[in-house]
Amino acid sequence: MGAGRPATPEPDPAAVIRHIDAAVLMRVNRIAGYTVTEHYAVFRGKDETHPVAEMTVKTTYRRQTGKSYQVLSAGGSALVRRLGLVPLLEDEQKINLPGNVEHAWIDSANYEMKLKPGTQILNGHVCLELAIHPKRKAPNLVEGSLWVDAKDYTIARLEGVASKAPSVFAGVTHMMREYDDVDGLAMATHARAESNTFLYGRTVVTIDYTGYHIDVTPGN
């Protein structure tokens, strides 16, 4: 009887985390700036087909200054946009300011990480999954799972629960963000957040990212 195919050894967890940190830092150093079109849609109750409010914005990111937004179109409830989407954009601006943005990086400085066994296929990529636990509580930090490409350790997907409610009116917020390769860099392509609020009940916000134009730092 012939010998069976040898099992693929499990990667060293500490080495995987070091590689993730290196991939995050490489991405930060390479991106001098970018523009992207973001489409926001807000759904209420069980209906995820007909948004109650929508907004399309052109987002510009510059490493030295952070993010700025230009509203291209808006529709649906003006009240929902004003109370829901505008604060969301304002929070993103604050998070991405120089001096703040590093506290949002998905790395071992901000998260405890534990490698799970095996691999999974996401969007055609072989990925490793890690359980992640934020080292502090913040609305933009997620307790849940992180998937990274098994070859280059770039982020493929993030999913879990916000470690802190975005407001006193919001309950548990489930968050998901998917990434794909854009010009050799892992960039967000789709995001979803679901929460139950004191005033509005079940609310789902989706974001789709298209038309990236990335400025790469010379020499990186």
Image (spheres, rainbow, N blue to C red):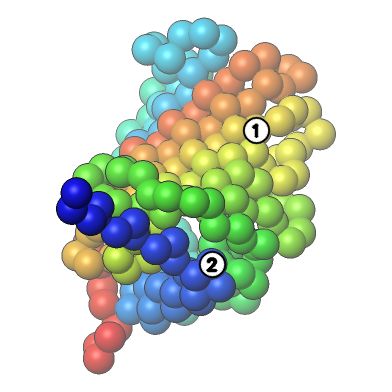
Q: How much space separates mark 2 and mark 1, taking CA atoms?
A: 29 Å
Dot label at residue 12: none
Report the residue at 62% width, 53% height from top: 132
Using the rendered view, name the quadrant where residue 83 is placed. top right
How many circles with numbers are drawn on the protein? 2
Report the residue at 68% width, 21% height from top: 196
- Residue 130 location in percent, x, y? 53, 53
Report the residue at 56% width, 73% height from top: 14
Q: Is residue 40 above or below residue 109?
A: above
Question: Relative to 215, is 197 on the left or the right?
Answer: right
- Residue 74 location in percent, x, y? 38, 30
Q: Which residue is mark 2?
A: 13
The residue nearer to you, when weighing 19 against 185, is 19
- Residue 142 location in percent, x, y? 62, 48
Question: Relative to 51, is 171 on the left or the right?
Answer: right
Question: Could one spot residue 119 in this view of the protein?
Answer: yes
Question: Relative to 59, is 216 on the left or the right?
Answer: left
- Label 2 sits on a secondary structure element that is helix
The residue nearer to you, when weighing 206 against 116, is 116
Dot label at residue 173: 1
Question: Could one spot residue 56 in this view of the protein?
Answer: no
Q: Is residue 86 above or below residue 118?
A: above
- Residue 88 location in percent, x, y? 57, 42
Q: Is residue 10 above or below residue 57?
A: below
Q: Amino acid at mark 2?
A: Pro
Quarter that holds the C terminus: bottom left
